[in-house]
Amino acid sequence: MRLSRQFTMSTGWIFCVFVCVCFTLGSFETLVITKGDEQWDSETSTARLLKKRSVSSAEIEVQSVKVVCKVTSRFAHTVMTTKALNKANISQEVSFEVELPKKSFITNFSMEIDGKTYTGVVKEKEKAKEQYQKAVSSGQTAGLVKVSGRKMEKFSVSVNIAADSSVVFILTHEELLQRQFGKYELMIRVKPKQLVQHFQIVADIYEPQGIAFVDAYGTFITNELLPLVEKTVSDKKAHVSFSPTLDQQRKCSECEGTLIDGDFIIKYDVNRAHDIGDIQVVNGYFVHFFAPASLPRVPKMVVFVIDNSYSMVGRKMSQTKEGLVTILGELPEDDYFAIIVFSSNFVVWRPHLCKATKENVHAAQEYVKTIEVSGGTEIHDPVIHGVEMLYEEQRNGTAPKNMVLMIILLTDGEPNPWIRSLPEIQEGIRNAINGNITLFSLAFGNDADYGFLDTLSKQNNGLVRRIYEDSDAPLQLQGFYEEVSSPLLSEVNFHYPDNTVNSLTRSHFKQLFNGSEIMVAGRLNDLNDINNFAIEVSAQGFENNFELKGQTNAQKWETIFPDEEYIFGDFIERLWAYLTIQELLDKKDKGTPEEKGNTTAEALSLSLKYNFVTPLTSMVVTKPEDETKKDTFIADKLTEEERGKLGRYGGFMPASNSYVSHAPSRPTYYVDGDPHFIIELPEKNDALCFNIDDEPGTIFNLVRDPLTGILVNGQTIGDKKVIPGEKVNTYFGRFGIVHEKFGIRLTVSTKEISVSDEGKEAKFFWTETATVKGPNMDLRVIKDRSLTVTLRNSVKFLIILHKVWQKHPYHQDYLGFYTLDSHLFSSNVHGLLGQFYHGLEFEVSEPFPGKDPKKPDAIMFVKGQELVVTRGWQRDFRQDVKNGEQVPCWFVHNNGTGLLDGVHTDYIVSGLFKTV
């Protein structure tokens, strides 16, 4: 944990978030905790307090850190408690930063301050959103989420603590541990950043099946700390603890630095038999765990569908090839496989699936090494072809029966939408697979359309996994493949008598993979019938069908652990609710609109009932300071799509798309340079640009709005001297701005600025800094730099002056024009810039090699046309007049033809204040 503080101001207090952006807050603090859909891993983290470098550790003392984990039948209940004391004689700010596993549901958050406890309440997200947006409108709200690596996220809450007072933060969350590679894993990240008087990690594990093994270790554990990891294991219980003293935490005897910095990891598994599985019952709810021992693997037929579009160029393609070569080398000889490589078109390595003999595998590896990038991303046809290859192999009977059929799709971009829409692609593939094949998707990097791939995989009994762009990407690919490489059973069905159970979670599973586990939960109609609880499990196994029938050995919890009072209530019921909510959230992504509505409503109801923070709910904590003001803080769980975006923005973003802590960035439209027109579109995270080439002296209409009466024209100038045979460069050297309703006329040149406002005229020069307030217009000139034009109760423009060395043989001074409040224009606005003020619908294909190897081309679909565009850079000079800030954009060739309404010559006018 780390600490940060700010001195209290007499008018309120300062809220300081992790990015060191401070907001003046009022006298209430409200914390809103929300969660988004995503791919999760089992992982637990301790809370941390932020500590600014300038703060003396003697002033803010972290007195204790305690993490208590109770794992019962795979269901983990974690309570993180941190106590801090303000030892200073003034009030200070304490920021509590928490890292949470992405699979967990927060169930409680509370703060104890001066003997008072403020506890969270779970609300429907939309209701929490209303409360949040009210705070947003008053400017008193802050929201921040940061991605923390691949498995975790952070959120922070700050409170003002009086002198000589303490605060206790308590956060509780629950998760169902998933078995992977034959074990369950609980990981606790501990990074206190300072010595802590009382530091303790305690984990208790209760497993009625019996505990096979327990391993506990830490990435930071030294030989001196190793004896402090205490582990006690009996038949069905295990206890792990780690509690170093203050001196034992020190890096050296005289050091203030701490050794505690890393991950504390507990791994375990349970005893298993070749039987119908283990069922546990608590208060009328049951859970059935199924992972029989000693089952032989079932051979598979797998088609690898690999993206080699231009966006895969470089490291991603080389890493993909490296990972695929290794995966091919691990194929068992009784598997069958095929390779399809796709971009704008697709290529099949061999027309039929091949048995994974050494010769075939070697030939495939050599082929993979030759794959090169080209073209866009056309997903539909290659996947459909892979489906047809699998069906053909089945029909021919060349491969054994009962083989598991799967497709592994790897892509790093968005599918091309101009042939088929994304829903059409999903529907076509779903219809072709028809429930007979499992489709796994690997989303490589942050640009992959994770949401599309997630839905596509869920619709076809699979899952999606993000492959992070890092040096270990080949290992990530191999790790995913290992999870699904050894199916033990397929078409696994659980049948419970209809008259004995209700509210079942999913009871049909496409596969059971080696090292994993299937869980089914539900309710018993009559707890007295527990001894007559008959179960049937059927599946397809190796060379024959698999079927198990029998009476359950289910026992009540108090019978298994008679001396243990259960640690967090009716855990089987909460486990059932957890599983049900997860499955309902999956269903809402792949059902019909009616099914989506029903499943969403049911998942919301359960989330509220069991106090879970899920993608549909938020937890709100209000801490009153006085009776006059209220401030809201939100920390939001991110979707995988948002996490991908964060990879491009350094890890930070507003808490969610619907919870925005400040006004979103508005589009900026400007023209600068020789002359470059730029349309920045923040909502698309992109920009478009085009040049206009014409004779010097030409006057163009940039903005014309007949309803507001605003007109902006610009006249071009050329270089002082033109080299024979060279292109004539033009720039804007004069602008005319008119506001007809108020009688305003403004002329701006590279030499002077003249204005007429209601008949009052003025003239001034760029050589002085000045602020001029007229009846209907304000002007602010920064010497030799910029002019800001503000039309009263209306729009704002910025004009940049580019000064060129007076003795330059060719170039001369020129101007740039920026629109800052385009949303204030009417819907009738037009002009070279104005036509884009109210948005533009367009799509861009995956890039492909262009004439310049450093500037790829793409196809843009805009206004019913297909344009070849080129990726390039222009400059925004608002912050740095000399060098500018680079803006990546899609360049539209030929004077913007196809993007503009009409052609550029349609915008030529006869005078600086003329409309024609």
Image: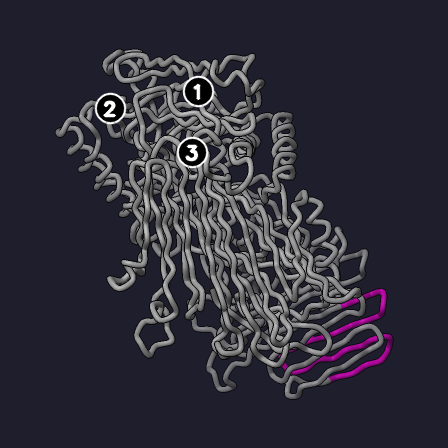
Q: Quadrant of residue 795?
A: bottom right
Q: Which mark is residue 463?
A: 3
**Residue found at x 62% / y 33%:** 600
Q: Magenta segment, which residues?
A: 738-763
| Disc 1 residue type (three-letter) | Gly
Would residue 458 be seen by someone viewing this image from the given angle? yes
Q: Position of residue 903 (x, y in %)?
A: 61, 51
Q: Quadrant of the C terminus?
A: bottom right
In the figure, residue 711 lies in which quadrant? Answer: bottom right
Q: Secondary structure at mark 1?
A: loop
Q: CA distance from mark 2 to mark 3?
A: 21 Å
- The reply to whether the magenta stretch includes residue 348 is no
Q: Nearer the viewer, mark 2 or mark 3?
A: 3
Disc number at residue 435?
1
Q: Residues within 10 Å of mark 3 (few under 14, many from 20)?
A: some
Describe residue 407's horizontal placement relative to residue 452 as left or right.
left
**Mark 3 residue element:** loop
Rendered view: 392 above or below 719:
above
Residue identified by numbered label 2: 336
- Residue 259 placement (x, y as % from top left): 34, 67
Cα–Cα gap, marks 2 and 1: 20 Å
